[in-house]
């Protein structure tokens, strides 16, 4: 997996800063069905193309709930092999359980359920905390995209500051990838990125944004640059994302 390309500079004449462009832009809030509730992505039509502003901000409550649900599912799926292994390793457990008196059987069932629930809750809360931390850090990046029929310009602020100017002929396709945000604290939680696949490299931008937002932005970029539509994930990638909770 290619790591994010950050910090490259665009050679040439003096350019406006991200703050200047965002302050000067009379932007239009996108309110289409493809975008999730509360999306803060903004777009402005220009004479030679489109300007898309993805501001920094907090993680919306809807996204937090969705992340928590995915982490609970991931933790639950992670315990299934353990339960299966226990059944295979101790085949006589069911016989011993059936020989218990009704009150003891009920108590054992309740205790086992509580134990499994507590373990799943502990694992899912740990995964959720790491994921929320990664999303919070990722969403502190603001990004400005300026796209015309022959060129894409990207300006991103820290923590993943980057400047790119990419000719249309260099871009092979667009896709959504999942991978960790580089973190000196060792947090390897997987988050969504928009991947710009070049012929000899991959540039990942917009970390931690909702996949609906990424798909909408990718569709706009592809239409303006006359590129193939967004590459859908394969079945293996979908299964992997479910298991890993991304």
Image: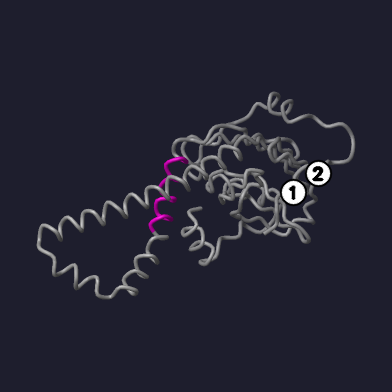
Q: Residue at x 75, y 45 (%)?
A: 6
The residue singled out by tag 2 in the image is 8
Q: Residues within 10 Å of mark 2 (few under 14, many from 20)?
A: few
In front of the other: 49 or 69: 69
Labelled pair 2, 1 in contact (Cβ < 8 Å): yes
Query: Which segment did they paint magenta?
Result: 63-76
Q: Extreme left residue here? A: 102
Q: Residue at x 60, y 34 (%)?
A: 42
- Position of 63 compared to 25: left or right? left
Magenta residues, dominant SS class: helix
User: Does 176 appear above or below 46?
Assistant: below
In front of the other: 217 or 44: 217
In front of the other: 55 or 78: 78
Q: Residues within 10 Å of mark 1 (few under 14, many from 20)?
A: some
Q: Residue 135: x and y, percent?
A: 56, 41
Secondary structure of the residue carrying tag 1 is loop
Secondary structure of the residue carrying tag 2 is loop
């Amino acid at each position: 997996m290619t790591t994010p390309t950050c910090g490259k500079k665009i050679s040439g004449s003096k350019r406006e800063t991200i703050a200047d462009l965002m302050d000067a832009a009379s932007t239009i809030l996108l309110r289409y069905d493809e975008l999730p509730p509360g999306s803060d992505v903004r777009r402005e039509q220009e004479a030679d193309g489109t300007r898309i502003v993805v501001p920094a901000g907090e993680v919306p409550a809807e996204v937090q709930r969705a992340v928590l649900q995915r982490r609970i599912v991931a933790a639950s799926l992670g315990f299934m092999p353990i339960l299966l292994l226990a059944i295979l390793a101790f085949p006589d457990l069911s016989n011993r359980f059936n020989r218990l008196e009704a009150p003891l059987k009920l108590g054992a069932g309740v205790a086992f359920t509580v134990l499994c629930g507590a373990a799943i809750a502990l694992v899912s809360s740990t995964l959720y905390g790491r994921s929320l931390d990664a999303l919070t850090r990722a969403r502190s990046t603001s990004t400005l995209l300026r796209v015309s029929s022959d060129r894409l310009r990207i300006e991103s602020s820290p923590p993943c500051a980057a400047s790119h100017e990419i000719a249309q002929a260099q871009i092979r396709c667009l896709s959504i990838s999942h991978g960790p945000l580089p973190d000196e604290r060792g947090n390897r939680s997987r988050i969504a990125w928009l991947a710009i696949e070049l012929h000899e490299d991959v540039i990942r931008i917009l970390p931690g944004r909702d996949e609906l937002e990424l798909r909408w932005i990718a569709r706009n970029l592809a239409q303006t640059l006359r590129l193939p539509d967004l590459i859908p994930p394969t079945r293996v990638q979908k299964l992997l994302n479910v298991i890993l909770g991304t």
